[in-house]
Every structure is written in structure tokens, then in C-alpha cells.
């Protein structure tokens, strides 16, 4: 165990990989309420499970979200990110008609870019605390 997280094993490897992901809305539009963030967390948790990943921590503000994801080495981070952004955008658009006005050109909620960082030796607890302390929208 490292920082309370079990070291995972695959068929040919032993691993403990975490990525800090940050997605921002297109044009940094202030889109999300607490209800949207709770919904996004559940949608993104489902996507992570499909990729055999674990969503360790989730939080965000009115125009961005932070995720801490534990993932196996067989997962290409870019594929995971594309799925997280795509599925969450479709689900929000489907289930929250009020949010549709924030979709540019009909389908774009998220900015095209994203941040992905490895922990690089920082304790997981420090990053979890940082994500947990993000300000929620009113």
C-alpha cells in the first residue's frame, strides 16, 4: 500500500498510477451548479468503471472540474479523457435542458484542451485535499 491505496496488479505488471485531470468549459463559461457537479461526478464515475479505473476524488467550480483517477497502464489517458468529456457532455445535455444554452455549435460544452498531471512523488493526500477544497458554485 502507498498512501493507503493498494498497489494493483495486472497480468504482466504491478502498478499504482494516478492522474490529476482538469477540464474547463468552453470560453470558461460559468455553467455548473452543485446539482450539475453531483451529476457529473456520477457520470464520470461510471465512465471510469468502464475503463477499469477508479475515480478517487472529484470536485469543481462553476466553470471547471478536477478529477483524481487511479488507472491501469493499459488505459490510454487520451481515450479516457475523450470518453469522460464526451459522455458527461451528452448526459448533461440530455438531462438538463437549461444547460443547453452553454453548448457552442450545438455540441461543445468542454474546451478542447485539458490538464493532465502525474503526482510526481507528491502524496496522494495532498492532491486529494487540494481537489476537495475547490470552491463549489452557489
Image: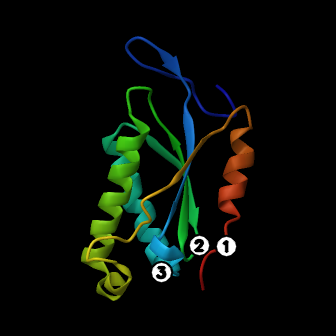
Q: Is residue 22 above or below residue 30?
A: above
Q: Residue at x 38, y 82 (%)?
A: 102
Q: Residue at x 59, y 72 (%)?
A: 61
Q: Nearer the viewer, residue 113 or 44?
A: 113
Residue 100 in picture, x, y percent from top left? 31, 83
User: Which mark is on residue 61?
Assistant: 2
Element marked by disc 3 = loop
Residue 89 figure quarter: bottom left
Which quadrant of the rendered structure holds the C terminus? bottom right
Asked whether the beta carbons under mark 1 and mark 3 sit within 8 Å of each other, the answer is: no
Task: Give whichever of discs 2 and 3 has the lower sequence position.
Answer: 3
Tell me if mark 1 has few (under 14), some (14-19) or many (20+) residues whose alpha carbon lies within 10 angstroms of its own. few
What x and y, as percent, mark residue 113?
47, 56
Q: Which residue is mark 1?
A: 135
Judge the density around disc 3: few (<14), some (14-19), many (≥20) Cα neighbours within 10 Å.
many
Camera-side mark, 1 or 3: 3
The disc, 1 or 3, on the residue closer to the chain's N-terminal end is 3
Q: Is residue 106 left or right of residue 54?
A: left
Q: Circle 2 — which element?
A: loop
How far separated are the C-alphas under marks 1 and 3? 14 Å
**Residue 21: percent from the left, percent from the top?**
54, 51
Give the residue number, with chain letter if any, for mark 3: 31
Amino acid at each position: 500500500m502507498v498512501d493507503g491505496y493498494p498497489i494493483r496488479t495486472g497480468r504482466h505488471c504491478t502498478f499504482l498510477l494516478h492522474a490529476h485531470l482538469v477540464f474547463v468549459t468552453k470560453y470558461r463559461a460559468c455553467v455548473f451548479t452543485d446539482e450539475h457537479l453531483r451529476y457529473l461526478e456520477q457520470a464520470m464515475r461510471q465512465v471510469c468503471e468502464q475503463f477499469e479505473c477508479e475515480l478517487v476524488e472529484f470536485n469543481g467550480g462553476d466553470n471547471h472540474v478536477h478529477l483524481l483517477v487511479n488507472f491501469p497502464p493499459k488505459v490510454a489517458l487520451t481515450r479516457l479523457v475523450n470518453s469522460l468529456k464526451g459522455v458527461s457532455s451528452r448526459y448533461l445535455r440530455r438531462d438538463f435542458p437549461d444547460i443547453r444554452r452553454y453548448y457552442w455549435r450545438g455540441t461543445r460544452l468542454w474546451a478542447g484542451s485539458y490538464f493532465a498531471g502525474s503526482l510526481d512523488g507528491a502524496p496522494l493526500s495532498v492532491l486529494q485535499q487540494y481537489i476537495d477544497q475547490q470552491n463549489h458554485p452557489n
